[in-house]
Image (cartoon, rainbow, N blue to C red):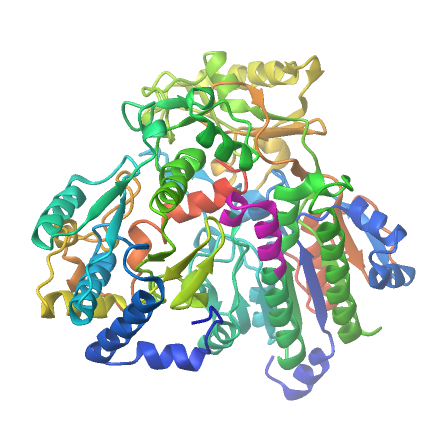
Amino acid sequence: MFNIFKKKAAKQNKVIVLGIDGVPCSLLKRFIDSGIMPNLAKMIAGGTLSPMTASIPEVSSTSWSTFMTGVNPGRHGIYGFTEVQKDTYKWKFPNADDMKSATLWDVAGRNGKRSVVLNVPSTYPARELNGVLTSGFVSLDLKKATYPESAYEYLKSIGYKMDVDTQKARESSAALAENIKTTFDIRKKAILHFLNEDDWDLFIGVVTETDRLHHYLWAALDDEGHAIHTFFLNFYRDLDALIGEMNKKAGDETPFIILSDHGFTTIKKEIYLNSWLKERGYLKFTKENPDSFETIHQESMVFALDPARFYIHSKGKYSRGSVDAGEYEGLRKKLKNELLSLEVDGEKVIKEVLFKEEVYSGALLADAPDLVALPHKGFDLKSAINKTEISGMGHFTGGHTRDDATFFINRKIDVSDINIVDVGPTIISLLGIDEKSFDGRCLV
Amino acid sequence: MTAESMSMEEMERLMGLSLEEKIAHSKKIIKEAIDKFGVDNLALAWTGGKDSTTMTWLFRESCKELGVKMPMCMFIDEGYVFEEIWDIFNQLKKEWNLDARIAKNIDVASKAEKVGDMVKVSSLNERNRKEIALLEITDEEFPFEPESFIGNHLMKTIAMNMFLEENKITALATAIRWDEQEARVQETFFSPRKNPPHMRIQPILHFKERDIWDFIFQYKVPFCTLYNIGYRSLGAKGSTTKMSDIPAWEQDLENTYERAGRGQGKEEIMSKLRDLGYM
């Protein structure tokens, strides 16, 4: 392991990864065709750009956790941004301390390799590693988000911003756009600094400004009259410039992977699943306008968490649980059938309902949602508990999709059905490390 | 007097000054502001919390030294104010003879009897409906509570904007501090704002949390009793929690987070998630 020749040989296997949060593959193809992303256009000639399937659910925390571990949520334990505590029903927000699997940089570090990990969601608070890490969404404090101290000092000195100030959206679209741009510029500065100055074996940098742009300003993409339309296109030109600079560093030798954690599409309607559960008598609260599940009524049989994770309120599992073990299976089947027939404006909303054992496996299966629902395109499934109606429009124009996430590698590969769980094992294999414990497969 | 951000070195220098030097620097900023904006169109954002009370004291001293009257204080009543905050508000208003005026979005507040009540957008006046439309939000109603995006915006930001407009305020002094949270590192002593157009005066940016407590005890400045029972930073009732049961000034200020009881904890995560459409 610490034999000097072995280490030298290992040094040559380097990998560069760029994460682009929330970018659909179809959008990149469109920008390549329309000349907005000339660098990426050149790169696909010798590489592979393919749609990829995200995790279930298709939210950043679960998807990036699946990427960074190469295993399914049944093993890493991150099923979403929110959980409910089984005894008190208080909100819990899983973070890096709740992640139960080794990360790619843990595996790389065990094998004497150094990693730089910038802005990957769900890595807060920063844990020690062989290399540098500053965590991404949801990070609260830069000092706690960054390892080691010297990296914190550097980031502080450049005025690094952990995330877009989404509060700017309350001011105006223009103020938000301006903040997206300044956050991206400083992100780019940090990425290029570590890419060029640090002696890494594995480099991972994630841009989250794309996702923020899409969440708030998706409507600007196709509306040429929209005040932010030009900004939207220019933002992708800037992103392409960053891709170009990183590609220069990679050259032909170093594998360069670009991926996103989910796709994006236009929202036709938001669907509020807890309202639907309330209407059908599955869910009750003891308070008129609940703001958490702390006031859940003990007669409740099911509740939902974002985006569409259904939990059976089982006796013995939850302190006020009322569903007997004998009723569990019948209730799941009934719920599945009713969800599949849910219609809004004459259209079917739910494409598929899966039981937990059909999606997840591993030591943490018990914590998994009992059912998950996958929507038809354009329906944004949500589990807000303070809504009274079943469907409506929020102030977002774009929402996540599970298909149409992005995978690119600067190599010709011939694989189909790429899933985000496959990216981690591919990276580890490209680093020259033999590791068999993944759920995904190596793509090269 | 520009809003150019200063170098890290300059910030560190200012934060490293002694308490007396910090007070002197704050007074210099305050006098500069009074010189430029006068006292009639200047207001202090006073929340009853430890930082803005410190700033108010510094203003009083500076005004005495200049021989001018004390500017008005703006207190935002967002509808969920702690009783203990009202206590200190009334005590200091009397003791210090403050021209303390309350900024409140009466139109919204009158539509809810208690926190959590739903307010119908259609029941609001034109100004509030316009503000909601500006957010590009089409909700027909919203809950009257600090965690509600619309409610919070109308009861805090809009209440303040209306106050500034009605009182023709051209400069507003606020007590934010650099060490409070990462996002504030970019802030400068004078910072122009667009909507409505006014100058923000931020005279105690360079004070650390420890300085505030040292100052309060050295100058015997009255403070809210919530700090005695473990609160470190005061926000809205119902979304502010205690960090510990020991008094704020006895807690490990240097290695723990001041806003953990509101900003750095669950509320901040929730607000970030809500901003992206979760929950």
Q: Is residue A47 left or right of residue A105?
A: right
Q: Is residue B135 above or below residue A244?
A: above
Range of residues picked out in magenta: A167-181
- Towards the viewer: A321 or A330: A321
Q: Is residue B167 left or right of residue A203?
A: left
Q: How many marks?
A: 0
Instruction: Identify the residue at image location x=54%, y=24%.
Output: A272
Residue lying furthest bottom in this view? A4
Q: Using the rendered image of the protein, determine whether residue A440 is visible from the camera's viewpoint.
A: no
- Towards the viewer: B78 or A436: B78
On the image, which quarter does residue A17 sit in?
Answer: bottom right
Instruction: Identify the residue at image location x=58%, y=50%.
Output: A176
Which of the image's four quarters has the C terminus of chain A? bottom right
Q: Is residue A101 above or below residue A391?
A: below
Task: Return the x and y of residue A417 as percentages of the image width and height.
Answer: 79, 43
Instruction: Identify the residue at image location x=11%, y=61%.
Output: B221
Task: Return the x and y of residue A301 as percentages of the image width and height.
Answer: 43, 18
Task: Return the x and y of residue B60 as percentages of the image width and height.
Answer: 17, 63
Q: Is residue A291 left or right of residue A73?
A: left
Q: Tell me if residue A170 is in the magenta stretch.
A: yes
Q: Is residue A297 above or below residue B216?
A: above
